[in-house]
Image: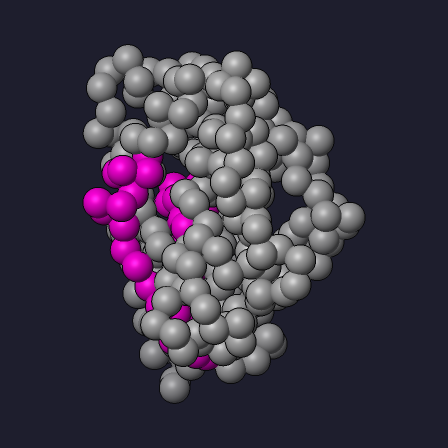
Amino acid sequence: MGEFAIFATLDLHALELAQQGHTLLKGIETDEEAAEALSAFGELVPQYDGSLRYQVKAAPGFEERRYSKSVNTILVHTEAPGWNPTPSYLALHCRVQATCGSGHTELADMRQFVASLGDQDRAALYKREIEWLGHNTGGVGTEGVRRPVVERTESGREILRFSYNLLTTGQYDPPVDESVDPAELPLGSFGIHLAEQAETFFREHKVSVLIPEDSILVWDNQRMVHARSAYRDAKRHLTRYWVAAQR
């Protein structure tokens, strides 16, 4: 592929990110190729454990939790809402695709969800602050931040944070059947109401992507919420990247 064609392809992916919030890069076989391709969107930054790469693969010990290393459904959220700033983009590089026909990455535009709400609920997303817990697995992390679901920056940009699990259980990676007194939750009963509305919107408007092997799904983490369907094939293996962009 010539230099002009490479730049044209990158421009197309940048346009898709801006317009629809996500894009798919194909023909990426190695970690090095992934890092080079993602450098067009920003700088790779360390994740919870301090590494630039995180292996998303089922592992023993997480069978009863909604966690990336389980095979369970993961509910609607943005990545690292307790970080400031949150990752600009998330990227999943598929190394081994699940053969069970599931394990889809699911995406929906949070801006559209916010716009769909009634005036009172929508205003609360801009005004009511939440203690977004820091999330640290022994590497780097933060102590958390206090922000509304929709944060307006000084430049006028909107950064969205969301976690169905945090609003309904007070945890990011709870046991599958966790139940908590609403009085103990970040936004109380309103948070449960908000999470249920978001889940309903998500199921009606989501895009489901079964990422092909040797391809990278990239999405705007400050705009899109994501989830994952349950799967059975424990050989499924993706590599996750966080990308920080100046915008």
Residue 72: in sight, yes or no? yes
Q: Residue furthest bottom?
A: 1
30 to the left or right of 11: right
Q: Position of residue 66 (x, y in %)?
A: 53, 48
Camera-nearest residue between 106 and 109: 106
- Horizontal relation, residue 220 to residue 144: left or right: left
> Residue 212 sits in which quadrant?
bottom left
The chosen color scheme is: one colour
Q: Is residue 93 above or below residue 46?
A: below
Q: How many marks?
A: 0
- Residue lying at 37% horizontally and 67% vertically, measured from the top left: 102
Within the magenta stretch, is there residue 209? yes
x 34%, y 72%: residue: 101
What is the magenta range?
198-227
| Residue at the spot 47% in from the left edge and 22% down from the top edge | 148
Query: Looking at the picture, how far across and down is residue 2, in whole percent?
Result: 39, 85
Residue 129 seen in the current view: no
Whole-percent x, y for residue 221 in the image: 45, 46
Residue drawn at point x = 24 percent, y = 25 percent: 117
Which image quadrant: the N terminus?
A: bottom left
Of residues 84 and 179, the one drawn nearer to the viewer in this rendering? 179
Instruction: Check if residue 39 falls in the magenta segment.
Output: no
Whether residue 238 is situated above or below residue 90 in the rendered picture: below
